[in-house]
Image (cartoon, grey):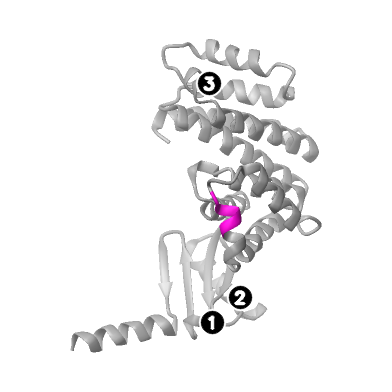
Amino acid sequence: MQAASRESYRIAADRLDAYVRGAEPSAVAATADDLLSVADLLRREPRLRRALSDPARSGGDRSGLLAGILGGKVGADALDLLTTLAAGRWSAPSELLDGAERLGVEALLAAADKAGDLGEVEDELFRFGQVVAGQSALSNALSDPVAPVARRAELARELLAGRARPVTVRLVEAALGGFGGRSFTGALTRLVELAADRQDRQVAYVTVAAPLGDEEERRLGARLSEMYGREVSVKQTVKPEVLGGVSVRVGSDLYDGTVLRRLNETRNALAKS
């Protein structure tokens, strides 16, 4: 987002935080669902996006337009947050859509946090991503941009039924819709990171040939926490093809100590000699 859009989002996000402090988890989850439903509306209606981000209109005019469209169709708390968004200045219509989506996602994460479930939601999102990545047919079915989102969401709900919390399922649906303009896989990854960030944690993506034991994972997490100055959530991916060693990615930092990397370096050196 550009500066004006970031400031408009920050105002709405502050308002969300104030609302969450005094609301029950179920009420916050319902508000989040309203926010994401309106984000879906904005995605389908480019003319509405343009009208609600038109700099030639006053903030009051834009928020009034949205209130007139949504009156009686969403809860009062969601309407207050959405009209706050509409009243802000947006550098582009797409950034208003991004703001509405992000606000809905943050509301879902806040609901899980208040219910004491956010750590489990973070893990469920990551595990589902691992399951999808490990089955090419499933990955193709869920990532197919031609297939309607509703059909792909139905498939995801069937797969997650009885295995994930309702908040996790709703977040997966947001990922299928292309949260933040990302691919399904990229959106899932971003949601895992947002869940960790709300818990003041960094995510470390660890690739190994065989699963780390609990104590090994604990020690690695403790070491990374020392390096980054905050708690680190370790997410393991097992890939036998790396042969041994460990690859760790934290944000844009990559520490690759796998046997495969060393073999490739040796092969490249031999080819040049």
Badge 2 element? helix
Circle 1/circle 2 CB separation < 8 Å: no
Amino acid type shown at disc 3: Leu
Dot in front, 3 or 2: 3
Which region shows up in magenta?
140-144
- Residues at marks 3 and 2, CA–CA distance in whole angstroms: 49 Å
Q: Say which quadrant the C terminus sits in.
A: bottom left
Amino acid type shown at disc 1: Pro
Residue 173 highlighted magenta (yes or no): no
Q: Residue at x 61, y 43 (%)?
A: 148
Residue 261 locus on image (x, y percent): 39, 80
**Category of crowding for the residue at label 3, using alpha-carbon neighbours closer than 10 angstroms: few (below 14), some (14–19), many (at least 20):** some
Residue pointed to by mark 2 = 217
Q: Which residue is drawn at 75% across and 45% down?
A: 114
Residue 138 locus on image (x, y percent): 62, 61
Dominant SS in magenta: helix
N-terminal-most mark, 1 or 2? 2
- Residues at marks 1 and 3, CA–CA distance in whole angstroms: 50 Å
Q: Please state the total of marks drawn on the protein image.
A: 3
Circle 3/circle 2 CB separation < 8 Å: no
N-terminal-most mark, 1 or 3? 3
Residue 141 highlighted magenta (yes or no): yes
Is residue 174 depicted above or below 253 in this figure? above
Q: Which mark is residue 48?
A: 3
**Category of crowding for the residue at label 2, using alpha-carbon neighbours closer than 10 angstroms: few (below 14), some (14–19), many (at least 20):** some
N-terminal-most mark, 3 or 2? 3
Residue pointed to by mark 1 = 240
Badge 1 element? helix
Amino acid type shown at disc 2: Glu
- Residues at marks 1 and 2, CA–CA distance in whole angstroms: 18 Å
